Image (spheres, rainbow, N blue to C red):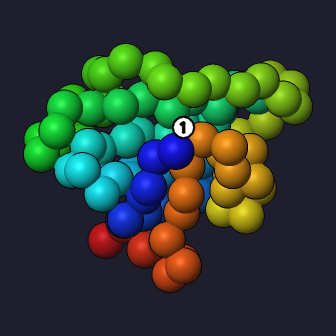
Amino acid sequence: MIKITKVIRTCWACPSQWELVDNEGYPYYIRFRYGFLSVRKGKKNKDILTAIEGKEVFSYNFGGVFSGYMEYEHLKEILKDVMIFPEKEYENYG
């Protein structure tokens, strides 16, 4: 399991996006758009751009082509077997 220490929501809808960092310093980029959820992993102790361009480590299809909004609780439910999220809620970008 990946233990997440920081979560920032960068976009609410179309796409819903989050930037995460795990306890080892790896960044993750999560994006939900067109009914497709993608989780990408970046390089250790590097910025989020390495995750945006990084390897996809998890994907999930649901909804339709017009689906682009996801609640944080739904994201945590989908990823419950992959990631452990912090007790504190996410931060908003900006």
Residue drawn at x 65%, y 32% is 37
Name the secondary structure under disc 1.
strand
Residue 91 quadrant: bottom left
Residue 79 quadrant: top right
x and y percent of residue 60 in the render?
72, 26
Name of the residue lying farthest toward the right: 63
Left or right: residue 74 versus residue 17 is right
Left or right: residue 4 versus residue 27 is right
Q: Is residue 62 visible?
A: yes
Residue drawn at x 77%, y 24% is 61
Which quadrant is the C terminus positioned in? bottom left
From the viewer's perspective, is residue 87 above or below residue 16?
Answer: below
x and y percent of residue 73 in the render?
73, 64
Residue drawn at x 74%, y 45% is 78
Q: Is residue 69 visible?
A: no
Residue drawn at x 55%, y 58% is 84
x and y percent of residue 4 in the render?
42, 58
